[in-house]
Image (tube, rainbow, N blue to C red):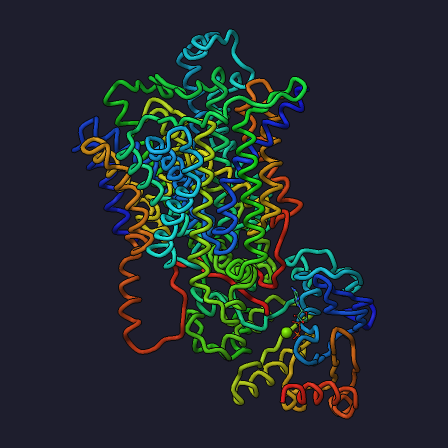
Amino acid sequence: MSEALLEVRGLNVVFSGFHALTDLDFTLRRGELRFLIGPNGAGKTTLIDVITGLTRPASGSVRFDGRELVGRREHRIVRAGVGRTFQTSVVFEELSVVDNLDLAAGFRRPLPALLRRRRGVSDAVAAALDTIGLGDLADRPAGVLSHGQRQWLEIGMLVVQRPRLLLLDEPVAGMSRDERDRTGELLRTVARDHTVLVVEHDMDFLRRFASTVTVLHEGRLLCQGTVAQVQADPRVQEVYLGRAKEAA
Amino acid sequence: MAPAGLAVSAVLLLVVAPLVLSPFRLDLLAKYLCYAIVAVGIALAWGRGGMLTLGQGVFFGLGGYAMGMHLKLAEAGPGKLPDFMSWSGVESLPLLWKPFANPVFTLVMVVLLPVVVAVLLGSLVFRQRVRGAYFAVLSQALAAAFVILLVGQQGLTGGTNGLTNIQHFFGLDLYDDADRRLLYLIVALVLGLAYLGVRQLAASRYGQLLVAIRDGEDRVRFLGYDPALVKTVAFAVSAALAGVAGALFVPVVGLLTPANLGVVASLELLIGVAIGGRYSLAGAVGGALLFNYAKTVFSEELPDSWLYVQGALFVVVMVWAPRGIAGLAGQLRDRWARRGPLRPVSYPAGADRPQEVST
Amino acid sequence: MGALNQLVIGASIGAVLLLAALGLTFTFGQMGVINMAHGEFIMAGAYTAYVLQPLAGGQAVLAALPVAFVVAGLLGLVLERVLIRRFYGRPLDTLLLTFGVSLILQQLARDIFGAPNVQVRAPGWLTGGVDLGGLRIPYNRIFILVLAVGCVVGISWYLARLKQGRRMRAVMQNRQLAAVSGVATERVDQLTFFVGSGLAGLAGVALTLIGPVGPTLGSAYIVDAFLVVVAGGLGQLRGAVIAAFTLGVLNSFVEFWTANGASFAKVVVFAVVIGFLQVRPQGMFVLRSRALS
Ligand SMILES: Nc1ncnc2c1ncn2[C@@H]1O[C@H](COP(=O)(O)OP(=O)(O)O)[C@@H](O)[C@H]1O
Ligand SMILES: [Mg+2]
């Protein structure tokens, strides 16, 4: 068994002439918690899209646990053990929190179980409910949740799928300070027994919760290292500060 | 529907109606119940699954013609040709007809034919993520093509006239009031079974999954399910129900013509569900009964204005009660709640809302 | 020879399909509105020619072209203003709504003009045809072809050159972006609906040249017209043109090659469209967009 869980090699993504990702190589080791940063439009979401089968690359390969993911359909990739969340959370508003989790836990269920009504709460769902701290809201429809709670529910829905790799796209965007802290703790818990890739912008959040960081810029890998190393890198400063100047 | 409501409906349909209705009215009710069986399927596919199927007449027709062919053969007797074939100069029984002499084969085909067509269409179309309005248009095109096919094959299908003059149904004499009452009871029982079965399905995890796919197909994909498969199953179930309904329609009405299953007929199957409430099974059944009753009344009293009424029904329901009669209470509650304290925005269940999960 | 003949027939079926579908590529393509009453706008166009007959005599068809465009366009505009605009984002409900409208319009036509079909006389200069080495092409078919091509050219010019046209295209490609860039999308929608429905009126006039006019004239074409739009790709003029002629020619060849062909033609066309969607699920030409649904 190799060290690497995810190996992205020579990845190119082109959208009608526009190169969103260029010759990207990227590796995730088993058990790692990795942060992926980069200015808007750097290609972070695109990378996740390619890994999860939503976007087809022009060339390159994505190997997960030694198996090629490119060309597989989305639900097959999920079944292979790769789960993701979206930048804008999507939960099923008419279903209760428990039902959302139960649904997410379900693709492994045998057909007869699928054709029956849910009775009680399975252990996995109960555990997830506990992890994300929404026990009190278990039977409320997901439509009433706040933005932060939705993100947690999404993470919970991911965890109950028992994936081996979690891809989280900007999980703390738009959250209050308090919610960010709780999400950070949640990430730590989840990362204990999963390999996790988190897309995040917020430097403060990064300093507190990240160990290894990868920086993307204009579809290319800019640098990789600890938070301190990355922050000290002049190229990273240039990318972020240059942008800041433009914006000003 | 609550168990009490269910029991009351069962008593009304199975005991009261056969006792108090004249044979003529009971026949009409039996016909409406056939449409209600289709409605149960539509409520599953459209209400739960978001698949607006404008071609339900095709499945109704497949089941109906399968049954009709058997009944015509039984009528003609062994070795003889059904009446319309001799009229159109057919001399020997077409190959397609031969196996339908067998009642078991026929009963299997009543379900199997619609299911096969639905699975074929569903898996091809849903797999390619053709959905929403596109799917609706395609299902309608199927209905149009099917009717033209039937009409064109005069010698095989009876053409525009269809299969007429059906007088017996598995030993029942369709000109005998007592036997007709029995036929009515069979139809009512089938409707009851269809209702209970689909209700169970809708309440199951599968039913939840179906609704989840309706509200966010792409999100469900990332939960590890194949939406195409889930939708195809629901579509096939609705097709099977339509097929069974068509098969019962033939003895109840005594004939089946392409006009019973074309584009307009398919839409009529749908409007009842829309009126009653697509999200509610009971609503769908009630709507189908109500709509077809209204159609009978108007066609008798004011035949010329029926199209106006029908057209206006579509407009009124869509504008003022997209969730149908069954959804009116909920709609009023929502309206009232909107005046109350602010709640997090949630989409009305009636809207086929646009989804966007990635930016 | 037979094949060539079928090709000509196919092209003329294609031209009719294209005329019927052109307006839909706008209303369906830009606004996602499935307007089932589009068929009745076609019917309205045809009856316009019939109404003008006593006035314009043999030239009713020519006189009717602009009038039918305006009549059908206005009908569309009213429909959009009164009903459809409440339904944006609910395509399936719109479909059922407009089906109701189409039933009402059909009955209205029946009450006004009577249930039996009526005939519009073709102008004298459209009777007869050209002989091309034994192949006879009737003038009225040529006229329809020219009209269809003229419409396509006119629309392309309009979309590319005129300010309103460019706005229309902008909204078609990205409604939100157009809106924040200061395009009054509501006005554009109205205009789109007017033009799209007006084109149905032209289609109706053209149809009077090849057959009688009745209340259900439009509903006979609407399903095929939608198939053209689906196969061609949403809001894609090129796609609609290619799809219309392909389906038209396919139709005429199947009719020719199979005994009792008309009966199978529609089934074959349907199967081909489904097959085609396996290769190009979003039709021939697609506007790439990032949204998932
Ligand atoms: N489907 C698409 N079509 C065209 N351009 C796209 C598409 N998806 C992404 N892009 C472009 O690719 C670039 C990278 O986008 P994205 O991966 O979303 O960036 P990030 O998530 O890092 O902010 C952006 O410039 C974006 O506009
Ligand atoms: Mg992003």
Q: Is residue B355 left or right of residue B292?
A: right
Q: Is residue B276 left or right of residue A45?
A: left
Q: Which is nearer the eye, B66 or C233?
A: C233
Quarter of the figure with residue C161: bottom right
Observer able to see residue B41:
no
Residue A135: percent from left, percent from top: 47, 77
Against A229, residue B7 (above or below) is: above
Against B112, residue A110 (above or below) is: below
Q: Which is nearer the eye, B341 or C279?
A: C279
Q: Which is nearer the eye, B290 or A14?
A: A14
Residue B192: percent from left, percent from top: 34, 41
Give the residue drawn at x 47%, y 68%: A98
Give the residue drawn at x 46%, y 29%: C209
The single residue placed furthest to the left in the displayed view is B20
Question: Which quarter of the figure is the C terminus of chain B placed in?
Answer: bottom right
Give the residue drawn at x 64%, y 44%: C278
Against B193, residue B49 (above or below) is: below
Residue B262: percent from left, percent from top: 42, 32
Quarter of the figure with residue B344: bottom left
Against C115, residue A127 (above or below) is: below
Q: Is residue C116 left or right of residue A35?
A: left
Ligand 2 found in image quarter: bottom right
